[in-house]
Image (tube, helix red, strand yellow):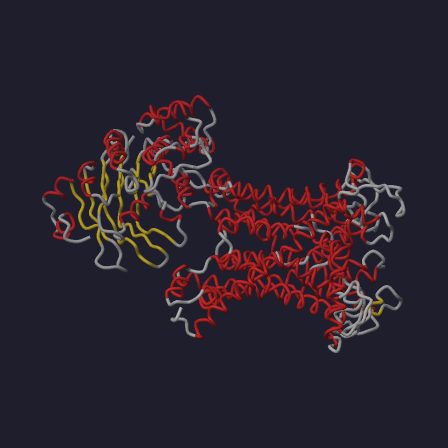
Amino acid sequence: MSLQTPLQSRRVIADRMATVLIYAAFLLALIPLVSVAWTLVSKGLQRLDGTFLFTSMNNIGAFDDRGGAYHAIVGTLQQAGLATLITVPLGVLGAIYIVEYGSGWFAQAIRFFVDVMTGIPSIVAGLFVLAFWVLVVTPVFNDGRPGFSGFAAALALSVLMLPTIVRSTEEMLRLVPAALREGAYALGIPKWLTIVRVVIPTALPGIVTGIMLAVARACGETAPVLLVAGGNPAINFNAFEGNQSSLSLFVFEQAGVASQYAPARAWAAALTLVVLVLALTIAAKLLARRNPLAR
Amino acid sequence: MATRIEACGVSAYYGSFKAIDAVTMTIEPKSVTALIGPSGCGKSTFLRSINRMHEVLPGAHVEGQLLLDGQDIYHREVDVTAVRRMIGMVFQRPNPFPTMSIYDNVVAGLKLNGVKRKPALDNACEKALVRANLWDEVRDRLSRPGAGLSGGQQQRLCIARAIAVEPQVLLMDEPCSALDPISTLAIEDLINELKNQYTIVIVTHNMQQAARVSDRTGFFSIDRTGEPGRLIEYDDTSKIFTNPAMKRTEDYITGRFG
Amino acid sequence: MTTSSMIASPAQGSSAPGGGGPLPRRRALGAETVFRGTTTVAGAMVLVIIVAIATFLVIRALPSLGANQESFWTYEGWFADSDPPQFGIAALAFGTVLTSTLALMLAVPVALGIALFLSHYAPRRMAAPLGFAVDLLAAVPSVVFGLWGRDWFYEPVSSLSSWLHSVAGWLPLFGSDGPYGKSVLLGSTVLAIMILPIITSLSREVFVKTPTANEEAALALGATRWEMIRTAVLPYGRPGIIAAVMLGLGRALGETIALALTLGSTYAIGLDLLGPGGNTIAANIANRFGEANATGRSALIASGLVLFAITLVVNVTARAIIYRRREFTESAA
């Protein structure tokens, strides 16, 4: 068109270029996504079978092509389970304090440090439990020997899960309309019963979503488990005594073994771990979509 | 069992802002009292002071005396939940508990205050729903969620929920403002029936409604924004709407301001 | 007695309402007080844990710091298990900052591009599932990224390394002529991919919240889509972007396992990105912990304390930005 001056065409070119770059950024991000998924499935499936899922690494040498991740699966489930048992009551109650009771600088400080705590590196959480539980508390009951255990790993995972759960629960509680609380107060229902029987049930789907996402993230953590659970090639059903492994730790261990059979074991365990984590994540997101509070 | 309410110099605050100033009025038992006035005049705040719901908001507090059959409900040692069980409240928008069935909504106040026996709950549920003129519409779907009802039905469900705990006073904060005309009529009929047993105080924006349902009317107003609301005139409804004593009341009634 | 006796809860005994009896009295130590107290304790646990982390790390770090024969702050090597122990944080802290900075430089432009794509470019039907895919990328455990980087991604990166060396080998950054394997470049790229989702989803959130009025005002003045983004979306989202980048940085500084698998675990301060080398505080802890003796563990805890302090500063700064912004937008609303 004759209306187009050079200035306008330069603007149009800038607009086109931005569009191209933004599409390119997106396509660029798809490459690792697809590549990770492809490598994971193709390498993981080589060893992923019943034997792998239901045998341990007990008495399996590095240059042995057998062995499995049963001991690690047991460890991951127990550690994540214990961490959930610890953090859910603590996190939900803490969020209730922040939203329903807290006021003034104390509640503000807690809110702020919950946010700060979400940024604590997992390795620091591991070092903390090492310095506190494994090297200081447990030796008292253990003739002075440090008590590496699945429970110690659960404690470290709890440090990581707690702020996530407080935060997501806090957000969900804030979404519960004040009118519901007032409706209950007006019936002469005490505040605490209103919270337990009206507010929490209303916010429950969202709270559960947050918990599931936190558990999924905890399942994938390696560093804390490495520091405080110690690892163990054999099956240990007792999380409270003796070393334990976990899926992520097993992946890391096998990645460090110089043997032609180790990578296949590492990838099969990684695939198992990702299936577990993604199943939890997807289930959580689907639940979130059906949450009436979050539209 | 209906109860007389006496407000003696009741002032209510939001933080340091004074929302109503020294309201003094006596509300007679088994009558309907309407509170009218322009927006922001403090009529809802006064209503919420009667069952101590005002103080639920952060920073809000009340001064003065509010006597329920001669006892001050703001006395330091009074159990606030007991006050609210005696003085029920219905809100502007219906607010049934979304996670509860119709049945559980109605008996929530009883259940969560320690009534456990099923026959007692069943009985109270039916009685409350019958009184709220909702029983025939919901009797065969008591276990369905309360949120599935229409707006008017939900509001009657909330009235049933409020009267299930057998209060002596029923406060209604613009209970029809979110409803269609037919539902409004149903609620007004219900108020007429309920006044045989309860002392009812209703806040309304709708002057026809005040004229239709109430025996006595209180007119609240403010001098200008930022000033606290005051009770300007309080008298028989017929007197307020035909021959008010104060010029400001007349101006408001005839639509000259507000 | 009237029916009102029904509602008198057992706890209140004879003080049933109605009949003009006295109003029930408030109980000093009821369920309300207990419940409130419990929630307060639970909330305070967060503060307790943060203080406990700092305290116990300091206590357990002191023995090795006392025995250390070299300066903890300036020495580059790590011989914490020898007798006498010699170790320093200098190379590790440098490596941590180098790797994270590089990862941010790679990740931020791409992440902002994806965020804009999802908020303003992608068709609406596609945006939701694609955003979901990005979130899933965030859920993949870091050990999987580490394994992927070590077993697969090192190949394209070493090709890239040869190319960079041939084109710009005169730069110290690209000075190494091989062999190319575990390197700062590999670690940083993997790290960049890992922090991509968090920066993307946080900045997408602020982009989506740009007031439509601002966008329409720009478009009404005849702005192209890109000009609208530059004049309305980006300025509005700037504090949010800064916070997202800071949080991504916090994540990057603390990342452990993926870097333990993709960095060369050397102890030297240098700018060479391509050659075998690179290390971080966190990766060093993961790699050294297994064989460490008592002093070695104490030294690793000392290094962890430094990491804790660095991430604390970064996170507090990021949160302070977000909080200030929240006050700003709330008062404006």
The extreme front residue here reads: A2
| Percent of width and height locating residue A48 | 77, 40
Left or right: residue C240 compared with residue C83: left
x, y (%) of residue B36?
22, 46
- Residue in view at x 56 percent, y 46 percent: A93
Please state the horizontal and vertical placement of residue A96, each as a whole percent of the image.
Answer: 52, 47
Say above or below: A181 vs B224.
above
Q: Residue furthest left?
A: B243
Residue extending furthest top? B119
For the question of whether residue B73 can be seen, the reply is yes
Placement of the N terminus of chain C among the 4 image quadrants = top left
A3 relative position to A202: left or right = left
Work out whether residue A173 or residue C227 is closer to the camera in this orientation and state it: C227
Q: Residue furthest bottom?
A: C170
| Image position of A264 (left or right of B152) | right
Q: Quadrant of the C terminus of chain C?
A: bottom left
Q: Nearer the viewer, residue A267 or C306?
A: A267
Closer to the camera in the image, B154 or A100: B154
In the image, residue A191 above or below residue C327: above
Tell me, yes or no, if residue C2 can be seen here: no
Toward which corner of the image does residue B16 lie, by quadrant?
A: bottom left
- Quarter location, residue C228: bottom left
Answer left or right for B235 relative to C304: left
Q: How many marks?
A: 0
Q: Position of residue B203 (x, y in %)?
A: 26, 43
